Amino acid sequence: MPDTLRGNLAIGQSGGPTAVINASLVGMLHEASKHAAIENVYGLRHGVEGLLKEDLMDLGGTSDAELDLIKHTPAAALGSCRRKLRPDDYVRILEVFQAQNIRYFLYNGGNDSMDTSQRIADLAAREGYELRVIGVPKTIDNDLMYTDHCPGYGSAARYCALSVRDMGRDVEAMAGYDRVAIYESMGRHAGWLTAASCLGKESPIDPPHLVYVPEIPFSEDRFLDDISRCFVEFGFATVAVAEMLITADGDIVGLSEATVNSDSFGHIIVAGCANYLARQVRERLGLKARANRPGTLQRSSMITASAVDREEAYMVGQAAVREAVGGASGVMITLERIGNDPYQCTTGTAPLGTVANAENLMPRAYMNKDGNMPSAAFEAYARPLIGDPLPPVGRFAYRAVERRATVAD
Amino acid sequence: MPDTLRGNLAIGQSGGPTAVINASLVGMLHEASKHAAIENVYGLRHGVEGLLKEDLMDLGGTSDAELDLIKHTPAAALGSCRRKLRPDDYVRILEVFQAQNIRYFLYNGGNDSMDTSQRIADLAAREGYELRVIGVPKTIDNDLMYTDHCPGYGSAARYCALSVRDMGRDVEAMAGYDRVAIYESMGRHAGWLTAASCLGKESPIDPPHLVYVPEIPFSEDRFLDDISRCFVEFGFATVAVAEMLITADGDIVGLSEATVNSDSFGHIIVAGCANYLARQVRERLGLKARANRPGTLQRSSMITASAVDREEAYMVGQAAVREAVGGASGVMITLERIGNDPYQCTTGTAPLGTVANAENLMPRAYMNKDGNMPSAAFEAYARPLIGDPLPPVGRFAYRAVERRATVAD
């Protein structure tokens, strides 16, 4: 048995918030309180920003009631960041680790955050500073490698499934007035979240009728043909699109009217193809079309959080502390699916270096042959992650009353 | 006691759907089954469109289980419409009424629908056809006169309050990266729904920090000043705006990039000032800003429905049938608030003619002096309508860890 490493534990939250990243935090805190090796538990304010500024919160005295509230609070309770480490940051980081006797560093984020964690693990190894570094996965995009899925995804997926289902009922009710409703989902490169729009669909008339993901080259002509076909069949059409779509020629759809930003990792951030597509439907098909763009509501909405996702996020947080105390370092906690019937997951680990900066795109087999609707294989994968069955909705059986009036002109 | 009018009852749903318009429908169906005067209950498919086409559904045989499902289904289960009656429609309408022996006509909608109902009541009176016409109120905009509030509003208000609260936590967590988040609420002329964004606010740092409603002339310079002040105080800013705002000169804010449509009542429909305003924040203040535009999700979301709203919608539906059977005609059912402690409402009636085409705007006293935040009077009015208290959220008490490292440069 190795010598126990005694010292303080620092936790950081990084990247876009989710509905359940705080559940992971609470999992870490609960688990940390069980291990004598961990002396104090510190929260970094705004991730590595807080580390660089030595802006730490003492989380040790937090009551169970406070923790339960935090577990059900959306976004990132410690504050998050998108800070890429610069070469001169490392001296400072080591200085803070030493001054605060931080021996356990748990970083909760997406693939950029795993890269940051790897760099911090490398720093400690290079400088001979004993430190255990564990990555804790989090992303609504579900694009981390080597994990069955990512905490945060199930809740955002539930938001998407519920919103698209309800949006579809709305446009169905207004058929003849509103014709086409387009829902814009987050997920610039990976279609996992957009595809989740199908999880409330039970019959062909149910929304969505069409789903377009970033992995499949987008053709505007085919999109308009698809909509026309739907409109003929149902009298309306409901569509889910990712916030960024790319044509076969590599052009970003609707770039001229999109919001374009870049982040400190050098990623170009484009969002907003739905407005452009709605305009194409209006102008080229002459059908009234609306774009719904809930934006960050997708990742922050707490009322649509998946209970399965929340418990898995908590479990992943616990596992991170257990692994660190047990001697692991330089790994990210993963979720490994044991089975679907009943659905069950356990945790595992993957080397940070293999996860960092890699992107897990959706397999082609998770979409249908035409590339405009998720497949049964995707549904089987994603359905357990959104937790409880969606609240049921109904339709009247159409019992027509016999016409008795003179036929109208 | 008047002679009982025996015959069939026709129910129509009209205008933009809500989360609870089907609860009113179920209230009507339950109540109708209690009265021998009502022989059959017919649903108009897509409101007066269904009347003109004699496209009626027999709702009589619907089981209790089906009705319970419909009560919890968003949008309009019969189908809705925005059809303005034309002079040559009246002959046809009378023909269908006579052929189907429709003696009770209940129309569930907003002020345009009350106008339609009034016209149909006038037609019957003019032609000597005995018909009882009752308007059933519905609108998320809450802009009907002579009723304390409108069924549909409380649920959309709850959606707004929850979404803005969660969105605010998201931008707070990302402070330093995302700076300003703007939520665009429905409500082109009346600020009731936008103002509801404040109902999750408990302390100054909580979202929203700023609220702009259509009733108060909008100044872009003052808006940018307000945001700058917030940013200095909190490091971020969260804003709720109505989808249409007007300057003191009468200009529509951001018209150049808004979606502009018109409906069959001749109303110009403008939506989309949030994108424009976010761009102004980016360009003139240099702060990263996002616009969240959930669009029709606001009126269709079922998971955020208010239990109070749903029960009142049901109650209003019941009252409509009772009034009609009791001999009333040419009135709209209203909600009358008995008190706030405990909150309690009863139903009343108002003449259709006084409600039709009138707009109940928010009183100036429901906003603060600066016109950028709802007042305590508004909160007292609106809070009971969103039903159960919002699920609580927390924040860590900030117990700073003493700095021990050398001060960073």
Image (spheres, coloured by chain):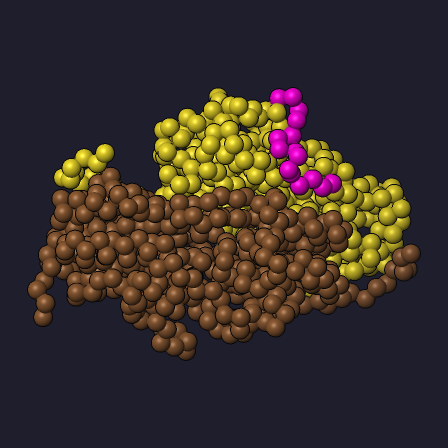
Chain colours: A yellow, B brown
Decide if residue A304 is on the left or right side of residue A55.
left
Q: Kindly indicate the quadrant of the structure image that contains residue B139.
A: bottom left
The reply to whether the magenta stretch includes residue B349 is no
> How many numbered circles are shown?
0
**x 74%, y 40%: residue:** A262
Would you say residue B89 is visible in this rendering? Answer: yes
Q: Position of residue B193 (x, y in %)?
A: 49, 60
Q: Quadrant of the C terminus of chain A?
A: top left
Q: Position of residue B228 (x, y in %)?
A: 73, 61
**x 52%, y 44%: residue:** B260
- On screen, residue B354 above or below B56: below
Decide if residue B61 is on the left or right side of residue B235.
left
Would you say residue A208 is visible in this rendering? Answer: no
**x 17%, y 44%: residue:** B95
**x 69%, y 44%: residue:** A135
- On screen, residue B202 above or below A219: below
Decide if residue B80 is on the left or right side of residue A141.
left
- On screen, residue A34 above or below A295: below
**Relative depth, front residue between B17 and A129:** B17
Q: Position of residue A359 (x, y in %)?
A: 66, 33
Q: Where is residue A245 in the image (x, y as percent from the top left)?
A: 60, 31
**Relative depth, front residue between A175 and A339:** A175
- Segment tinted magenta in the rendering: A248-262
**Relative depth, front residue between B222 and A88:** B222
